[in-house]
Structures are given as structure tokens and as C-alpha cells.
Amino acid sequence: MPFANYKFPEGTLDHARKEEIIHRTTAMFVEMFGEGVRPFSMVLVEEVADGGWGRADETLTRAKMGLPPR
């Protein structure tokens, strides 16, 4: 079963954008593996609370990413 898990800072995506990510990712899986994988494809779009994630040993926040506060 193809599986993708996207994580974004909380409040950066609206419902339409999340839906687009799900559709485009599913289309990529179908392109790569064939139409038979569509019913078994899983795409999770998760929102992470501000400061709840990091990279290269640094906590990321909306401010550090140049995004407005929530």
C-alpha cells in the first residue's frame, strides 16, 4: 500500500490545499504503480503545533520560518 505522510506548520494550509495535496499524491502513486493502487493509497496531511518540530537540532517556529503568528 503506497503511503505518504506530510507534516505542515499549524494553520498554513486550508482545506482546499490539503485536498489538492491528497489528490496530487494519489495521482503520483497511480502514475508510478498503476491504477490498481488507487484504492489502497493512503495520504495523511498533518498539522504540527508551532514549535513542535525541528530540523538539524533546531526547533522550528512560524516566526523562524517567516510566517505570521497564529
Image (spheres, rainbow, N blue to C red):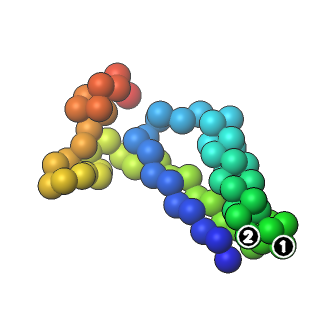
Q: Tell me the number on the disc at residue 33.
A: 2
Residue 52 position (above or below residue 35): above
Viewer-proximal residue, 51 or 37?
37
- Disc 1 target residue: 36
Name the foreground residue: 67 vs 31. Answer: 31
Q: Residue furthest right?
A: 35
Residue depicted at 84% across the width and 66% down the height: 35
In which quadrant will I find the N terminus? bottom right
Where residue 39 appears, as percent x and y from the top left, is: 81, 69
* Residue 17 placement: quadrant: top right
Check the picture and name the quadrant holding the C terminus.
top left
**Which amino acid, mark 1?**
Gly
- Residue at point 24%, 52% (across, down): 55
Residue placed furthest toward the bottom: 1
Res 66 seen here: yes
Asked if marks 2 and 1 touch (Cβ < 8 Å), the reply is yes
* Mark 2 vs mark 1, CA separation in Å: 8 Å
Asked if residue 15 can be seen in this view, the reply is no
Secondary element type, mark 2: helix
Residue at disc 1, secondary structure: helix
